[in-house]
Amino acid sequence: MAEEEASSQTDSVQQAWSAELFARASQVWSEVLSEHLRNVTAGNGPVLNWADPAAAVRAAGSFLDAGSPACSDELVPRLRTLISEMLSRGQNLHHPRYIGHQVPSSSPLAGLFDAVGSVTNQVMAIYEMGPWSTAVEHALIERLCRKVGWSAAGSSGVLTHGGSLANLTALLTARNVCFPESWRSGLPAGAVLVANADVHYCVTRTAGILGLGVENVLRVPVDKQRRMRTDQLDQLLSQLRRDQRPVMAVSACAGSTPTGAFDDLEQVAEICQRHGVWMHVDAAHGGSVIFSERHRQLLRGIERADSIVWDAHKMMFVPALCTAVLYRDREVRFQTFAQDAPYLFDPSSPGMADIDSGMRTVECTKRAAGFGLWGLWSLFGEQIFADLVDQVLARAQQLHRLLLAAEDFEPCNDPACNILTFRYCPDWPGASDLQLNWLQREIRTRLIRSGEFYIVQTSLDQTVVLRTTVMNPLTATADFHDLLDAVRRTGQKILQERAAGS
């Protein structure tokens, strides 16, 4: 009996690594996924396959419980079932009516390059473990730095897994450069981080992680376009100097999360230079507009930043996660960390430290995050990124015009890029602000669970608004007309139910 079990286990291992079985399985994978993309990109079916969370967990667990050794003839049909189940229960970002979070309808072709890295498990930390993935990352960083306006020889950077980790990495570098003893001795008393009032929560989270404390993130008020008020920034930095409170950095926004606003980076840079303060730009969302001749002026002054965070898995439309951390001064590249790992880094080859990524990122083992971006760029050239940016920004302007023309809708920001907020304002005599806030939330909940559209919500100065991000180049004007109709229809049904209940 023990010998039979051992034989079964050995067969399972051989099948899991079989190139022949992989060939058959990947053909099924291609067939199922291609059919899914054809349907979803045509706008068929729901956007979100909503299910009760507890029921979804039970369903996922049932497949785990059913797993068992099988012959290869049984495994391929089982794989088809599992992939079909994944697709039928997931979020369909490639649906033209997905206009929610800042997560794109990524290029399926880019996903193929990512898949090569996943199947062959190309990892990074040291060059010899991932020679091509390391080379790809360096080539991408050089070109992104040049797009910013820096020389490839004088600047540097790394790719990492998302904007949150990227902001942590960049601001850790700023901390260690501005407070050289902080790695060993901690932060100086009274240290602060200054940021746009709409700063992403990952920056305040970073303050907590770095020991600065979230209460020491000082938020600069924003203007009507939700851009950092540079007059207030100047006054705050002057006051901090008088109070002898050290400033770790100023964090500006280039495509803020709530509304996509771009700070006046030229003015921020002038003020930071005058006060001798590190300038950090969170351009996770908006960095990609630099490819566009039409819109790159939004980033005027970004070349004067000390550090930049830029997500390729947003408006470069590659699969998550792929984020660049860029430094204007190459000399800071090893100040992010101050530690040794002799089992990884060979002191007999000190020149490899510039190639290896492990001393410059939070991760040790790191997946090859750049393959999707490298593949898409290599296939189409950089013009595809300009075309994508121009297309989705133009679509957002179309939606804005429709909202302006509709008497029962109120746009809440003039979109600088592809993020647009608005409110549904029906004829509801005597409705309070709290009641209108409740209505927006209820509309959004019902709309996404219906699968008809996917949008999100946020709050602007205590006002709840509906929020869209045009992250699918296949979204058309007709989809926007249908969105307004769906919001109206849902809102009116809610109000009718409320009236009947009262």
Image (cartoon, rainbow, N blue to C red):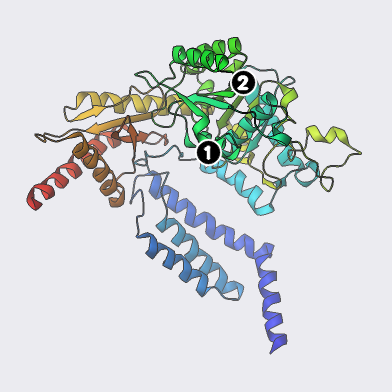
Name which of mark 2 and mark 1 comes first in the sequence.
1
Left or right of 88, for residue 147: right
Residue 278 numbered mark, or none: 2
What is the secondary structure assignment of the residue under circle 2?
loop
Q: From the viewer's side, name the closer residue of 413 and 68.
A: 413
Identify which amino acid the numbered label 1 is placed on. Arg
- Reading the image, the residue beneath label 1 is 205
Q: From the viewer's side, name the closer residue of 215 and 29.
A: 215
Give the total of numbered labels.
2
Left or right of 244, for residue 285: left
Question: Which residue corresponds to the image point at 42% horizontal and 44% vertical from the top-left?
Answer: 93
What is the secondary structure assignment of the residue under circle 1?
helix
Q: From the viewer's side, name the closer residue of 250 and 46.
A: 250
Question: Which residue corresponds to the image point at 84% horizontal and 45% vertical from the top-left?
Answer: 342
Where residue 201 appears, as percent x and y from the top left, is: 47, 36
Where residue 68 appears, as percent x and y from the top left, is: 57, 76
Question: Which residue corresponds to the image point at 75% horizontal and 31% vertical from the top-left?
Answer: 334
**Rendering quarter of residue 454:** top left
Where residue 343 appears, as percent x and y from the top left, is: 83, 48
